[in-house]
Image (cartoon, rainbow, N blue to C red):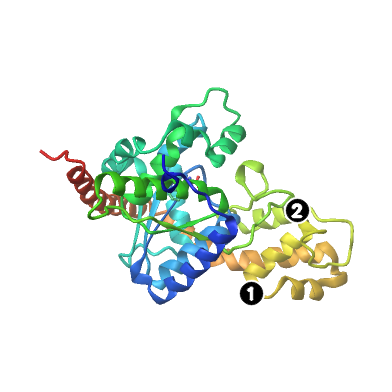
């Protein structure tokens, strides 16, 4: 294999730099780009998702960038046994997206689940021939997920899902993928697959773009225990669908420290600082200013302010959420429309792919 063909992860700093340039160009030239993003339907979203990634998507949406959102239902099967709630989770995730401000009515955003787009899934077959077992085996994110899932017998879907993810991105020729750091290896693999495909089958006229990562600038939101990432499975999250009372009760139980005077100091006081950061995301004031206003009021006052500002901030979203929840037929329609559009795009790509691979009859 030549040097040029190897998977080169580059440095993280270089990726950050490229991502900043991309961010600037997206504002000036939104029409040059097509965003592809996705989530696994493992449950409802919490405020960590909202502040970490969903609001970024809403912002790109508002710039007028076309966006495809894949709900990766097949991926759920790679690391867990349960599948009973997949369909319900797909619908609840869609409700979360819409209530957070993702706009499907403007015709620029498409939401669809994997399992309904056979033409997308078919791309997996030629793509699998473009990577080696050794390359799949080296993927650091997959290794971590295998550890975290506690699986003793690893299914082949686990090793190959990053190739499936390449199909998610390339089926619509997405050229921008908003991601967190953990997804960068998958995106690099996607770029390699696009390059190798074009190199092997479409030298004269490339079929696929090499998509670029757009790193989220959002701060990492810790859970209410203040020691790890917010996550439903770690029991430290506030769900978007929680009631105002539930929210206030969770915040009351949030971990703080024994120092009364409130200061913003993420290194030495992660728990208190995380709560201040959340107030700041709701009110737009800096965490330092909020801390100095509370001062001797202590963690009691900090929690009271957070409950009030978070509940106020989420009120319109939650109102929309409960309206949508009582209109499941609309949610089904949104998904049906998304599936229709995604299949149209995927069929056109598959047609091109068959053509260059000499498989049309
Ligand atoms: N692997 C992603 C996650 O676990 C979800 C995902 C599936 C995705 N397909 C994608 C993300 C394509 C970005 C692009 O969160």
* Residue drawn 78% across the image and 60% down it: 272
> Is 85 on the left-hand or right-hand side of 288?
left
Q: Secondary structure at mark 1?
A: loop
Q: Residue 131 appears in which quarter of the rendering?
A: top left
**Residue that badge 1 annotates:** 284
> Counting other residues with Cα less than 10 Å from the Cα at mark 1, is it few (<14), some (14-19), or many (20 or more)?
few
Asked whether the viewer can see residue 257, the reply is: yes
Q: Could you say where residue 139 lies in the image, as x and y percent from the top left?
A: 52, 39
Label 1 beta carbon less than 8 Å to ligand 1: no
Q: Nearer the viewer, residue 4 or 157?
A: 4
* Residue drawn 82% across the image and 58% down it: 268
Task: Quadrant for the C terminus, please.
Answer: top left
Asked whether the viewer can see residue 84, the reply is: no
Label 2 beta carbon less than 8 Å to ligand 1: no
**Residue that badge 2 annotates:** 254
> Of callouts 2 and 1, which one flags the residue occurring earlier in the amino acid sequence?
2
Q: Could you say where residue 7 lies in the image, as x and y percent from the top left?
A: 47, 45
Evaluate if marks 2 and 1 touch, with contact meaning CB atoms under 8 Å apart: no
Task: Quadrant for the N terminus, please.
Answer: top left
Q: CA distance from mark 2 to mark 1?
A: 22 Å
> Is 281 on the left-hand or right-hand side of 5?
right
Q: Residue 193 appears in which quarter of the rendering?
A: top left
């Amino acid at each position: 294999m030549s040097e040029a063909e190897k998977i080169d992860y580059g440095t993280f700093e270089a990726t950050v730099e490229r991502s900043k340039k991309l961010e600037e160009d997206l504002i000036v030239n939104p029409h040059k780009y097509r965003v592809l993003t996705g989530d696994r339907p493992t449950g409802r979203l919490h405020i960590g998702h909202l502040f970490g990634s969903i609001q970024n998507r809403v912002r790109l949406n508002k710039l007028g960038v076309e966006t495809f959102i894949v709900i990766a239902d097949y991926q759920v099967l790679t690391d867990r046994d349960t599948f009973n709630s997949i369909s319900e989770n797909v619908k609840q995730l869609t409700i979360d997206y819409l209530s957070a401000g993702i706009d499907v009515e403007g015709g620029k955003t498409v939401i669809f689940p994997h399992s309904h787009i056979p033409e997308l899934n078919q791309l997996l077959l030629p793509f699998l021939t473009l990577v080696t077992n050794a390359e799949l085996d080296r993927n650091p994110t997959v290794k971590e997920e295998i550890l975290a899932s506690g699986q003793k017998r690893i299914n082949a879907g686990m090793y190959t899902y990053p190739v499936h993810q390449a199909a998610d991105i390339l089926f619509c020729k997405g050229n921008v993928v908003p991601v967190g750091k953990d997804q960068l290896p998958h995106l690099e693999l996607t770029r390699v697959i696009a390059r190798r495909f074009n190199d092997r089958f479409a030298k004269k006229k490339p079929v696929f773009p090499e998509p670029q990562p757009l790193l989220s600038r959002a701060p990492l939101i810790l859970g209410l225990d203040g020691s790890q990432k917010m996550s439903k499975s770690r029991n430290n999250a506030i769900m978007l669908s929680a009631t105002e009372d539930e929210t206030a009760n969770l915040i009351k139980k949030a971990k703080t420290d024994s120092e009364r005077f409130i200061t913003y100091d993420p290194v030495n006081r992660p728990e208190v600082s995380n709560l201040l950061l959340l107030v700041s995301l709701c009110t737009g004031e800096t965490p330092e200013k909020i801390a100095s206003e509370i001062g001797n009021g202590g963690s009691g006052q900090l929690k009271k302010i957070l409950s009030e500002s978070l509940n106020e901030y989420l009120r319109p979203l939650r109102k929309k959420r409960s309206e949508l929840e009582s209109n499941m037929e609309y949610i089904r329609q949104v998904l049906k429309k998304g599936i229709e559009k995604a299949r149209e795009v995927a069929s056109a790509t598959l047609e091109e792919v068959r053509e260059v691979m000499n498989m049309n009859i």
